[in-house]
Amino acid sequence: MVALLAAPAPLTNAGHTQLVIAAVLGIVAVVLLIAWGKVHPFLALILGAAVLGVVAGVAVDKIVTSFSAGVGSTVGGVGLLIALGAMIGGLLAESGGADKIVERVVARVSGGALPWAMAGVAALIGLPLFFEVGVVLLVPIVLLVSRRVDIPLMKIGIPALAGLSVLHGLVPPHPGPLVAIDALGANLGQTLALGLLIAIPTVIISGPVFGNLIARYVPATAPEALLPTRRPVTAAERRPTTPSGGRLDADGDLVTEDDLINPGTGRPGAPINEGQRPRRAPALWAAVITVLLPVALMLLRAIGELTLAKDTGGRKALDIVGTPIIALLAGVIFAMIFLGYRTGFSRNQVSGFLGGSLPAIAGILLIVAAGGGFKQVLVDAGVGNLVADAAKGANLSPLLLGWLVAVGIRVATGSATVATITAAGIVSPLAATLGGTEVALLALAVGCGSLFFSHVNDAGFWLVKEYFGLTVGQTIKSWSVMETIISVVGFAGVLIIDVFV
């Protein structure tokens, strides 16, 4: 990752009190602009950085230079990874690969184990997919399963949301963890490994365990309008290839109408465009490998760093293939071949899927970039060193400080990404005083704090409310409490690991 840019000396001679006031006003400006003024976070972060710099006494031209340097550093280190991750997610969605994973697991699991299966599936497809995309893909399946097996909606809905949310907040290549890793100079492989370790118990407690409890108090039912529908398949589309008159997919399973997908959208059951041949969903193994390949390569690099000498050929090879850009690029290429070309999509269609996945992340990239600029102004003005000195004097744990700062900004702004960016910038000077593993844990502590108590100022709150047909009160009881459990349990996991490493 790109190392944190830092000026050799603060850009201002302001005293401690002035710097504290500048930091507070800068953060308050961001919070008010987003929460009260409804200003886009990208613009709010730019204006907040300007307020911070001016109050701190930094010259305007130096504010611009510092902000631009932070933007360039962050986009260079994080932007490529976010784009590649979005491409993998786009191919999974458009080819029907994500649907294949969900439907296969649900079809093989009994009713009592469904909440656990749904949490596992959500965590699996949540590795490469952004939270909002995962919700859009999973919720129709959750609604349909709830109706078919007559199981309370919250009992399987909460585990699905928990799996997506935990992975989104703690595990690269999601934007929040990547930004924290970049800002703190943490080792990506270590953060990934520790994040997965913490994610397992966190998903279990906040998902199936809490879902089973809250289902008794939130009697939600699947909204009729959102239930997925399937169209009948004509005889001409069935193309029998077996003695019994059916077709077999790549796994040897009989192809049904649910497997037929629109060659333009990749959605099962979508209307087939005139003049175009229907495609099937890809093989299950191809979808699973697409999800796990980048993670496996990055984990192998982390294992190599712990077990192999630096100059050995094996270590060098793992360092190359486990580099985040290489690992994600390998995932994209694999997905292009096995989710795209091998399932019958043309080169133009695969290219369209890849390109179509990028506009959706433009806003995220802009927010992340502006957050990097805000962070750099914080650091260059000397605020970061001030916070570090204060934390040392108060004997406050850097992990607790990172979590608390992220919690405060998350509750105020409703944005997990803004909370991660700002908190990581504030505590970044502390990273220099920590060991490698502790820096990774600091990044995870910030990530946990950024998930705390989603409420009415968070777009995710309204997304969940509308998809599950809940009232505001029911959404707070279920979704908001679930997010708080994730934050607290995840941070407890960080502290436990810190005791033993």
Image: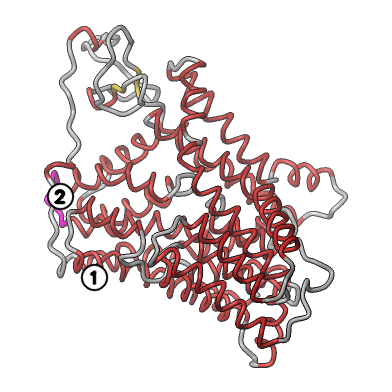
What is the x, y in percent for residue 112?
21, 56
Q: Is residue 367 above or below residue 242?
A: below
Asked if one can make out residue 261 in the rendered structure from this viewpoint, the answer is yes
Query: Which picture quadrant has residue 144?
Result: top left
Which one is earlier in the sequence, the residue at label 1 or at label 2?
Answer: 2
Is 255 placed left or right of 80 in the picture? left
What is the x, y in percent for residue 297?
64, 44
Query: Which picture quadrant has residue 236?
Result: top left
Residues shaded magenta: 147-152
Q: Which of 209 and 475 is in front in this view?
A: 475
Q: Rounded to the nearest whole Å, what is the CA distance between mark 1 and mark 2?
A: 17 Å
**Amino acid beneath label 1:** Lys
Tag 1's secondary structure?
Answer: helix
Q: Which of 86 and 115 is in front in this view?
A: 86
* Residue sitting at x 63%, y 73%: 426
Q: Residues within 10 Å of mark 1 (few under 14, many from 20)?
A: some
Asked if one can make out residue 303 in the rendered structure from this viewpoint, the answer is no
The image quadrant where one finds the C terminus is: bottom right
Q: How crowded is mark 2: few (under 14 residues within 10 Å), some or many (20 or more)?
A: many
Disc 2 target residue = 222
Q: Does the magenta stretch include residue 136?
A: no
* Residue sitting at x 75%, y 63%: 62
Q: Is residue 448 above or below residue 242?
A: below
Is 93 placed left or right of 74 in the picture? left
**Amino acid beneath label 2:** Ala
Cβ atoms at labels 1 and 2 below 8 Å apart: no
What is the x, y in percent for residue 224?
11, 43
Disc 1 target residue = 477
What is the x, y in percent for residue 22?
62, 78
* Residue sitting at x 46%, y 62%: 416
Q: Among all residues in the image, which is located at the extreme right? A: 311
